[in-house]
Amino acid sequence: METKTKLTAPLDGLAGLKENFSTDAVSGFIVFLLALPLSLGIAKASEFPPIMGLVTAIIGGIVVSFFMGSKLTIKGPAAGLIVIVAGAVNEFGGGETGWHLALGAMVAAGIVQILFGVFKLGKLADFFPLSAIHGMLAAIGLIIIAKQIPVLLDVAPALTKGKGPLALIASIPTFIAHLDPKATLIGVLCLIIMLGWPFIKNPIIKKIPAPLVVLIIAIPAELAMDFQTTEPAYALVHIGNLMENIKINVDFSGVSQIGLFIKYVVMFALVGTLESLLTVKAIDMLDPYRRKSDANKDLIAVGIGNTIAAILGGLPMISEVARSSSNVNNGAKTRWANFFHGFFILAFVLLASHLIELIPNTALAAMLITVGIKLTHPKEFIHTFTIGKEQLSIFLITIFFTLYEDLLVGIAAGIALKIIIHLVNGLPIGSLFKAPTLVSFEGDDYLVEIDKSAVFTNYLGIKSKLDAIPAGFNVTIDLKSTRLVDHSVMENLHHFEHDYIEGGGTVKIIGLDNHKPVSGHKLAARKA
């Protein structure tokens, strides 16, 4: 079999800046064009002052680049956290008060993330069942769409006040009846561009970021229709002066509402950490140099970024998947691409902030609806169903409880259902959190024998044994003594196999001949 030759990895630090200046600066510039409108839209949808989305992106680029444990991820505000941030602002009293108090919970969550990294809890992502994580992301997508439809139609904010996602979906006919024709026309045109852009075949045109095309069309259209004098104030973005907004904005008096405060610290830390770790994992697989990120170091960096951003009034940041993928596709080589993306945002805000205030909010809504559609695309439901009916049920129950209550309840419901399904499938209760795992070796051969069960709740113990095996050996993982191997473990073993082979070793997974897969998918759960 032909093996791929491993490319020589670019230098890091100042030597890397010198060696890769042009490629990283170009990629950073293209990502900046993508990040600028999205950061504004995410901040607005999160009930934060729009400029605070840019503050987070600037810190994520200029500050966090020096500490991060991954080479190609882009740090900035994420659509996936809109639901939590807006929820925190509203529950802490709404408006400016809610914003200042929500920042207190975000500072605490940033410190928790730093501690996650210090205590090497980067492996936490492997504890959560994948179908529940995907269900959570799909629910976030649906909530983003529900919240942005009235913005796309430019209806008065009073019509949406106090409505949850299900009430917003039910109110769509009312929003359509009250739409603003001029602003909606721009919004719908922008949405068509955003959704249609991936289908363009021309490689040169394809390289232009869709959000840039949206701004090139939306701003002149808004000027031609004279939004400044003919439309209500909520039709356009208002950001103000960066230097006037940069001050200590955090207020810790929300600690007096201790239950609410802890709830949001847990949600910011948990969801932000999960999304960041999943992005780092995904981008490592796209890295042409096949570098392995240090997930714990990256969590510390994101935690530092979040703590600083929240003190100054910014949104929480994560390693953001769409911007990071774009960074890889644009040929970025090192962490300096992330630095440049933050630098270009800072330069633009200082030198051309008046241009930002010409952006119609309907154009930003179109971008966010596109993000929501990607998160909750029908193919996510179909893909989950192909893995197994039980995975689809966990996925749907997580979506339902997230929409009905909140993200914490949603993911807890998904985990609870998965444990119930495992018990019904014959999981020995004694092995719910511990899988007896024996590792033996002879010469160049390692044998890993897993007993009783290999499921998401006990995988961290299995993972620690696998991670302790040195690189470059022949590893056999024997599952014949297990009663049940779930989908999350099948996928995690598949990732281990991929990474270990990259490091020069071999991996064989045996002992599943007497196990029956629950569906035709190659990574479906298997029971003896």
Image (cartoon, grey):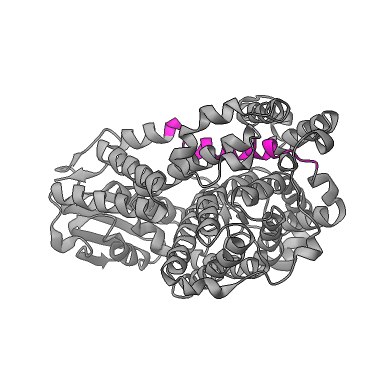
How far across and down, in percent of the image, does residue 301 sit? 58, 68
How far across and down, in percent of the image, does residue 118 sit? 48, 75
How far across and down, in percent of the image, does residue 176 sit? 58, 27
Going by the image, does 452 lie left or right of 461? left
In the image, is residue 234 part of the stretch drawn in magenta?
A: no
Asked whether 57 or 315 is in front, the reply is 315
- Whether residue 1 is visible to the viewer of this picture, yes or no, is no
Going by the image, does 437 lie left or right of 472? left
Going by the image, does 526 lie left or right of 257? left
In the image, is residue 378 part of the stretch drawn in magenta?
A: yes
| 440 w.r.t. 271: above or below | below
| 467 w.r.t. 4: above or below | below
How far across and down, in percent of the image, does residue 462 sit? 29, 62
Asked whether 408 or 527 is in front, the reply is 408
Which residue is at a point 78% across and 54% down the rendered structure image?
A: 344
Q: Main secondary structure of the magenta part?
A: helix
**Which residues lie in the magenta part?**
358-379
Residue, far front? 158
| 307 w.r.t. 178: above or below | below
Which residue is at a point 29% across and 41% down the rendered structure image?
A: 391
Which residue is at a point 55% across and 51% down the rendered structure image?
A: 82
